[in-house]
Structures are given as C-alpha cells and as structure tokens.
Image: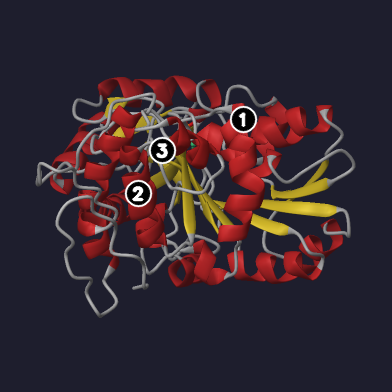
Amino acid sequence: MSKRPWGYRTRSEKKEPHWDLHSQTHAVRTGIARSGFGETSEAMYLTSGFTYSSAEEAFDSFAEETDHYLYGRFHNPTIAMFEQRLAAIEGADSCVATGSGMSAMFASLACIVEQGDHVVASAAMFSSCHVVITEFLPKWGVTFELVKGNNPADWAKALSKTTKAVFIETPSNPLLDIVDIKMVSDLAHKVGATVIVDNVMASPVLQKPLTLGADVVMYSATKHIDGQGRVLAGAILGSGSYIQEKLLPFVRHSGPSLSPFNAWVLVKSLETMEMRVERMVSNAQVIAEFLEKQPSIKSVKYPGLKSHPEHKLAMKQMNGGGGTTIGIEFKGSQTDVFAFMNKLCVIDISNNLGDSKSLITHPASTTHRRLSPEVQSEMGITPSVLRLSVGLEHSSDLIKDIEQALAK
Ligand SMILES: *Cc1c(COP(=O)(O)O)cnc(C)c1O
C-alpha cells in the first residue's frame, strides 16, 4: 500500500479517498483521465499530436508553463494513464513507458552512463540485456564487470568509484538465479552507483525492488503486465529526480515511445494482473513439485522449491511466491528434449513468457542463441534445458500434458 494521487479527471471531480489504497485498487482506479463523455472504461487517445487554442497557449506549453500535451513522442493521455497506474502499483514516484522491454532496459542505463564509466551486472541475464552491457556499452567506452552469486565480497570487489550503475536481473531468465537486491543495493550505494533492477520475471505483483533499496525498476510489459501475448511494451520506474533529470531528456529525444493503442491494452491488463499472476504462481508451484519427482528429469530450478539454492532469499524478497517460470534440466539429449516438446498437446512451443498460455522454450537454440557457448554454459544453459512459463490453464491439465509427453 502506498499513497499516490487518485488520478486526474477532466470531467466531474471525484473526492479523493483519505486512506491509503491497496495496490489492487490502484490497478483498477488510478490514473483515469476521463473525457467529457464520462466513459466507464479508459479512453484510447489515438493521436500523435495536440492542438492549442491560441499561439500563446502553444508558447506557454513549450515553455513548460502548462501541462498541455505537446507531441506523441513526449506524451499522450492514454500512456499517462498506464504510467500513473503502474507507478501507483509499484510505489514509485514516476514511470516512463517505452515501446519494448529492451528499449526500457537500454534507456535506463544509457541515460546515466558516459565514456569512462563502469557498469556492474549480475552474470545471469536475458540475452539481449547481456548484449547491451557486454557489447554495446563498451563500444561507447563504458566498461563492465559481471558478478555471479550472492557473495558480498565478490560484489564489493567489482564495485569502484567509477561504477555508475549496477544492473541486476532477479530472478534471471531462463534459469531463475536469485540476486539479493538489498545486499547489492547497500554495497552499490557506498560507491554512489544507481541500482537498476530488471523485475520482469518477478512482476510487480511478487517483488518491489524500490522497497528493497533499488533506485530504478524496469519492465518488459510484454510479459506479465500484458500477460496475454498481445503487445510489446516496456516501463522504467524510479525517483522523480532520476526520471525528470536523467531519463526524460534521453527518451524524449531518442524516441523509444509506446503506442497509445498498446498503452490502452496495458491499462486494462493492469486491472487483472494481480489475479493472473497469483494463479500462474500457484500453478507453477504445483507443476514444479510434480516435475521434481519425475525420473527422466535431472533437476528443476524454481525459486518456490526448497531445492533452489536461494529458496529462503527468494521467498523473502518475492513476497512468498516462486514466480511463473520453471527451469528444467532433462537427463536426455537435445533430441529427447525436442521429442518431449513436440509431444505436448496443451503447452505451446514459444519463446515468450508471462503469458496466460503456458509456453515451453528451448533457450539454447532460441532466446539465448545469441550468447556464446561459453556464456551459455556459465549461465547453466545446456541443450538439455527447457524453460516453462506457466499460464492460466487448469494445473491438472498441464500436469496431464507433461505426463503424457514424458511417457516414452
Ligand atoms: C523479455 C525480457 C526483456 C525484454 O523485453 P522485450 O519486451 O522483449 O523487449 C528484458 N528482460 C527480461 C528478463 C525479459 O524476460
């Protein structure tokens, strides 16, 4: 629960509640910019530009003396509804929406680093994030160091006065490594670094990095926030000063804007996100426990299982939920793993995750193909590893599906 503005209205002014609203109430109510028609559902302002009633009003608007919308690359009322709603749920001062998770990830770092700076990141990362940190930023003179695990001495050693940003992905995609957000944030702040958390895998429902000491949170809203496989989007949340002084000048002029249509889909998705994620998590827990008992499976990596090396930490920082994604290592070869995938009749083969439909992925040949074999094996991604994103189907149908596909 956090105190946030009740949202602005252009029509009848509704009285603001005098108590702190629960995040699920924010998810349905916050950020509504009702038009003069009094529509119940949020309006979609599908416009790239805005008009002014006079030249003076345009002058004042560009001088930032009014809050008049200027241009679609900068802002839009439907996008503002999504940003305000997500900020309220996250408990953040501000939010900026972007066209994809990767544009959010890139902008969150690019707006603060410059030549000569250093970035420290957790070693297990989504492949595109890995490419940005280890290939793109170095082209512009930004050095990096990757840290594995949760040994405070290893993190302290990597951090130095030139460390401008620390980027952590927890849980990691695809093998659900857990990074201690509070421990890393405390160490990073000692050297004055900004801590950015890729919170995609946990979603805003399970994990609130800002309350654990992180400075910035980024999302691929393509995943649990839309959660129904329809639109690509991203979001960056943080303090007013980071957003206003660093991020906005960068995104306004580099242009990773979200489409108002996609923003509208996401505004409506936020209303049901908590319920969807809770059900996906309870399904995933049941399936992970089932998978762990199967003789053809070598190991199951799921933060909700006691066998996960960071189970206790995960339960503490993820609000008691293990997440919606399971890493599975089979005893067999890639051929056996492919045969298993091909026999599934409910679960789809796909490279997406966080969807209402359960999806199975072979990371080595798809999502993480771009990484070298050495980096893949450091992350534990072998040809026998699958990632299962658990959806909203009934868990017993998912188990039956896995059971029949495992049967020789
Ligand atoms: C998918 C994903 C991203 C990138 O998001 P897009 O919306 O596909 O650009 C970043 N980080 C993690 C952990 C992801 O799973």
Q: Quadrant of the C terminus?
A: top left
- Give the foreground label among 3 and 1: 3
Q: Nearer the viewer, residue 40 or 24?
A: 40
Q: Nearer the viewer, residue 258 or 66?
A: 66
Placement of the N terminus among the 4 image quadrants: bottom left
Q: Amino acid at mark 3?
A: Tyr
Q: CA distance from mark 2 to mark 1?
A: 36 Å
Q: Amino acid at mark 1?
A: His
Instruction: Find out if the beta carbon at label 3 lies less than 8 Å from the nearest ligand 1 atom.
Output: no
Residue 90: give x, y in percent of width and height: 41, 60
Q: Residue at x 43, y 29 (%)?
A: 72
Q: Secondary structure at mark 1?
A: helix
Q: How is the image coloured?
A: secondary structure
Using residue 203 as the reference point, say whether residue 138 is left or right of it. right
Decide if residue 381 is in sight here: no
User: Does 137 appear above or below 204?
Assistant: above
Ligand 1 within 8 angstroms of badge 2 C-beta: no
The 10 Å Cα crowd at callout 1, few under 14, some 14 to 19, many 20 or more, is few
> Mark 3 — residue?
69
How packed is label 2: few (under 14 Cα within 10 Å), some, or many (20 or more)? many
Q: Amino acid at mark 2?
A: Thr
- Residues at marks 3 and 2, CA–CA distance in whole angstroms: 38 Å
Residue 273: percent from left, percent from top: 26, 50
Q: Is residue 220 above or below residue 7?
A: above
**Mark sitting on residue 45:** none
Asked whether disc 3 touches disc 2, contact meaning CB atoms under 8 Å apart, the reply is no
Disc 1 target residue = 253
Residue 262 visible to an observer of this rendering = yes
Q: Which mark is in front, 3 or 2?
A: 3
Q: Is mark 1 within 8 Å of ligand 1?
A: no
Residue corresponding to mark 2: 324
Whole-angstrom CA distance, mark 3 to mark 1, is 16 Å
